[in-house]
Image (spheres, rainbow, N blue to C red):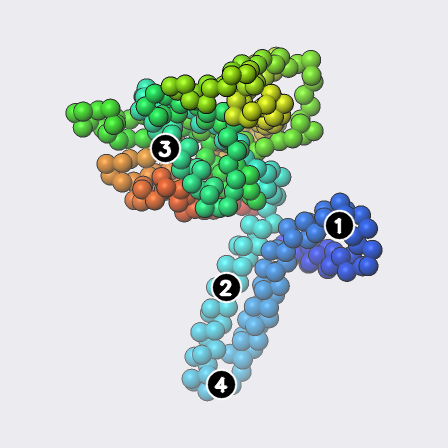
Amino acid sequence: MLEKLKLVEEKYLEMEQRAAQPDFYADPKAAARLLKEQKDLEPVVETYRRYRRIEQESKDLREMLDGPLEPDMKELCQEEYTQAKKDLENLEYQLKVLLLPRDPNDEKNVIIEIRGGVGGEESALFAHSLYRMYTMYAASMGWSVDLLNYSETELGGVKEADFILTGSGAYSRLKFESGVHRVQRVPETESGGRVHTSTATVAVLPEMEEVDVEIRPEDIEMQVFRSSGAGGQHINKTSSAVRLIHKPSGIVVSCQEERSQVQNREKCMHMLASKLYEIEQTRIESEHTGLRRSQVGTGMRNERIRTYNFPQGRVTDHRIGLTLYKIDAIMDGSLDELIDALVTADQADKLQHSEGA
């Protein structure tokens, strides 16, 4: 590992030298690519340099401990040596994580699709709660929310909501949210005060460009219709909403939130490209790994991943066995503790498999 890290540092230094050349920005695109690659390597190089520094300090302390020392000084050196060894263990783990293959989609924007599931109107109200949760989290991260498709019920629930979150690392933070989310609470429509169980499904896709996926024009059927909402809200007098049907796969996507057909079609194409990419990646993963299920799970939409229990004020993620008693904060978009735990579990799983390979 240390030999590999030395090569990474050498590559980083070469990039620094190239960036310092007077003609570096003569090719802006090439310069931008190099600077991005350099930025990606920065955490690895900084951690490696810190590791080497503490490793040298540890060796110096070991030599001091092996020599003649006053009792007080010996005790102090022993404490510093013990701490240095702990720091080295932590840094070694961090370096192993940093050297894991990166998901090429981590920096992409993310498309989220939310659908009401089992439970009638209560499932639609819960779907709305999830939509609010993710958009509040996006706001806390400084990401923008771009609504693609939104269909609501008479009581303000969500039949379906499709939206794009645009921001640095959006997919890396939300990619483990795909699956069935279950809620246990007393519905607003329930007069007897009984706790009901309902579900909603969430799908998370990296936003792909058309150039990332081959889509033949003859494979697409386009339909136009008037956008609509519950109770006559958002109704458009012109047929600006767009529905695209990908005939080979049967995938259907629609967008009705923009005012023009052109804008709605463009967003539909992004959604379609993302869905086709997901299908292809699932096929490749099935062939190469035999559908190995990681600790965090496959992220498939029919997999129950989390329960939100309102009477007990708890949220439980079933994939990693984590329960947090802060449901109000989570529903208000405070998702970092959950997401960090999922990311850590995924990293640990990948490390286990890379070391066992």
Instruction: Tell me where residue 282 sits by quadrant.
Output: top right
Question: Quick check: marks 2 and 1 in contact, CB under 8 Å?
Answer: no
Most extreme residue toward the front is: 237
Q: Residue at x 69, y 23 (%)?
A: 214
Badge 3 amino acid: Ser
Badge 2 amino acid: Asp
Which labelled disc corresponds to residue 31?
1
Sequence-wise, the earlier of marks 2 and 1 is: 1
Question: Quick check: marks 2 and 3 in contact, CB under 8 Å?
Answer: no
Q: Secondary structure at mark 4?
A: loop
Question: Few, some or many C-alpha atoms within 10 Å of disc 2 (few <14, some 14-19, many ≥20)?
Answer: some
Sequence-wise, the earlier of marks 3 and 4 is: 4
Sequence-wise, the earlier of marks 1 and 3 is: 1
Which quadrant does the C terminus fall into? top right
User: Can you identify the residue that label 4 sits on?
Assistant: 69
User: Can you identify the residue that label 2 sits on?
Assistant: 87
